[in-house]
Amino acid sequence: MIRAMPRESSPLRQMERFSFFVGLQLLLAACSALDVPTADREEGMLVLASRSRDPNGRPSERTLRWEARKTAVIIVDMWDDHWCKGAARRVGELAGPVNDAVRELRGRGVLAIHAPSTTVKPYEGTPSRERARRAPFRATPAPLPTSERWGTAWCWPDPKRERVLPIDDSDMGCDCEKKCPIEPPWKRQIAAIEIRDEDAVSDDGQEVFNLLSERGIENVIVLGVHLNMCVLGRPFAIRQQVALGKNVVLVRDLTDTMYNSQRPPGVDHFTGTDLVVEHVERYWCPSILSSDLTGRAPFRFDEDRRPKRGID
């Protein structure tokens, strides 16, 4: 007599069990991937893999744990256009990844401050502009700059703290084959970066300090353009925030420089940007990657064809 095969050991049953466990493993992997971003959501913390450099330029890494609600992200000069066509093209490419990072941070309780220098007037009367304008005055622990450059107060290089920049931007950095005339066309922030009612808009150092003080914010994430100019020098940007005693990090893949590769040190545009990132890490503040904020791969410009990037 031929006996029937037990149900548990039938080929069909085994295949069903195998498919179930494979599917379960894939589901668990997908859920894990969603939780990979470096923030501990339950504790409201941002966990950031920061990179700094010692006085000799040697890199080191350190994990930062920042409370999200005591953190702000400042979006620097991501205008709707630029006098240099190459710079405008790269800002357009950068805007989507910047918006993704800001959206993620905003969702975790980080204050987003949009700082499109000299173009805040179009936002007058909006909740985001009024939030900055009406923040209670707080005296700064260090004097704010009074000299002006490019329409705002300016924090000039500090020879006691930093050496000269590693790239020559004395020609203003246009890297187009036919040099663009310097006729500023920007009117507002690029539309691809959303400004929500709960955000703030300001290009004034005092207003930004008022905002941070009002909320007890001690940590500042800086991104935008251009690193060798506005991201360092504007009255709300890296030099100023460090001088005011804030904990600052630069998002090193969400920035760009004004650098003409025909000028010293004669490297390609993106290597020039990496050199300025290293300058910031050495003299001013650590840097992080946008993957710490979004859980996605770091951003890379389409024109950056190098096999390995210094930012990684």
Image (cartoon, rainbow, N blue to C red):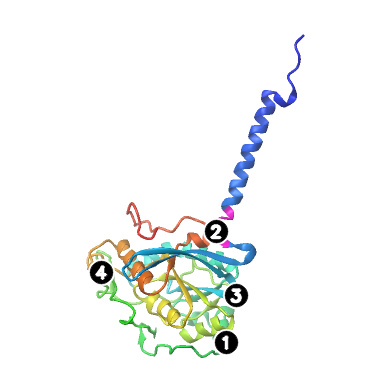
**Mark toward the start of the polypeptide (4 vs 1):** 1
Could you tell me residue 96's position as x and y percent? 47, 62
- Packing grade of label 4 (10 A; few <14, some 14-19, many >=20) is few
Q: Which residue is mark 4?
A: 179
Whether residue 37 appears in magenta in the rendering, the answer is: yes
Span of residues in magenta: 34-39
Q: Nearer the viewer, residue 266 or 187?
A: 266
Contact between labelled residues 3 and 1, with CB atoms less than 8 Å apart: no
Q: What residue is shown at x 65% (from left), y 29% (from top)?
A: 15
Q: What residue is shown at x 59% (from left), y 62% (from top)?
A: 40
Q: Which residue is mark 2?
A: 37
Q: Is residue 127 above or below residue 59?
A: below
**Mark toward the start of the polypeptide (4 vs 2):** 2
Q: Amino acid at mark 3?
A: Glu
- Packing grade of label 1 (10 A; few <14, some 14-19, many >=20) is few
Q: Which mark is residue 269?
A: none
Look at the numbered disc 1 and give the secondary structure of its residue.
loop
**Mark toward the start of the polypeptide (2 vs 1):** 2
The residue lying furthest to the top in this view is: 1
Q: Which mark is residue 134?
A: 1
